[in-house]
Amino acid sequence: MTLTEVYRKGEEMLLKANIPDADVDAAVLMEHFFGCDRARLIIHGDDKADEGLTQRYFDAITERTTGRPLQYITGIWNFMGYDFYVGEGVLIPRDDTEILAEEVCTFLYGKKNTSAIDLCSGSGAIAITLGKVRPDCTVLAVEYSKDALGYLDRNIELNNTANVTAVCGDVTECFGDYNDGTFDLVVSNPPYIESEEIDTLQQELKFEPRMALDGGKDGLYFYRIITDKWKSKIKPGGMLAFEVGERQSEPVSELLRIHGFENIYTKTDLHGYNRIVCGIKNNR
Ligand SMILES: C[S@@+](CC[C@H](N)C(=O)[O-])C[C@H]1O[C@@H](n2cnc3c(N)ncnc32)[C@H](O)[C@@H]1O
């Protein structure tokens, strides 16, 4: 078969299985297995495809027809220009989370020898981006799931971020391990889906760990705990920054207000939803 024939057959198999964005997924897997992006496919489409790689490509396409996320099949995903290992047991870093990562990197711009903590760190997408973009920032990445921690450790190594340290801890308890006023920044993309909503989610999300998604009855469990228990760990003038779900920016902003944060603001994602809420710890 030629490269074009392999691609077309892959796309057709995904379409038949009702996989959304079949063309994109078929193309991503072409690039993953053959190193052949869309531009190369146009130029070299008539070249004969290697038989071994073709078999692996169709095995991956078959896996994808079961709904297994594309990112778990490739085992690696890009976030903010950096590669991250992903697989069963860890949340796939989302494009929406790049808004939070960008915002916290911007907040630390121009500040020297800063200290940050990423709570509920998962693959380490936020912590490692911070560690790369702000190399003089010391970053702690707290995660409770043993499976996710395995990925976090490997991603710190993959990205060569010696200024990022993975910490095994339950964010609802381990706040006691840190002195007050330790951090310039506390950042978190915690689980925020309402417990009852989880079973109604699209097929792909069911492959991801429930622990990464479940934000309690109203989805706000972690925002309450983190704001209440971690605010004293932030230096005066430091920031608390959250990613939030589509209907959560108002209650989370209100929470920060009640806890005395100032200059509270939100930023929207590409769909126009408020995706992050940030506030500054007051100087009092
Ligand atoms: C929504 S995911 C976010 C992962 C990563 N920060 C990201 O943005 O891609 C939430 C993460 O919180 C972790 N988690 C859940 N409960 C936790 C707890 N009590 N303490 C620490 N981490 C927890 C989950 O295992 C999961 O990795």
Image (tube, rainbow, N blue to C red):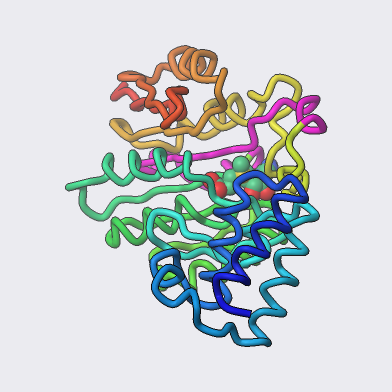
Q: Quadrant of ligand 1?
A: top right
Residue 150 or residue 47, whichever sits in front: 47
Residue 153: x %, y % from top left: 57, 68
Q: Quadrant of residue 132?
A: bottom left
Residue 170 visible? The answer is no
Percent across and percent down for residue 118 are: 49, 47
Quadrant placement of the N terminus = bottom right
Residue 33's place in the image compared with 104, above or below, is below
User: Which residue does the image show at 74% across and 55% down from the upper left?
Assistant: 68
Report the front residue among 13 and 196.
13
Q: Is residue 233 magenta?
A: no
The picture places residue 160, in percent across and down from the top left corner, at: 41, 73
> Could you tell me which residue is drawn at 73 percent across and 37 percent down?
202
- State whether residue 147 appears in this view: yes
Residue 193 inside the magenta-drawn segment = yes
Residue 161 against residue 139 in the figure, above or below: below
Q: Position of residue 184 (x, y in %)?
A: 34, 42
Return the residue found at the far front. Answer: 46
Asked whether 28 or 254 is in front, the reply is 28
Task: Identify which residue is drawn at 68% across, 52% down.
Answer: 144
Q: Is residue 63 left or right of residue 73?
A: right
The magenta stretch is: 172-200
Q: Quadrant of the C terminus?
A: top left
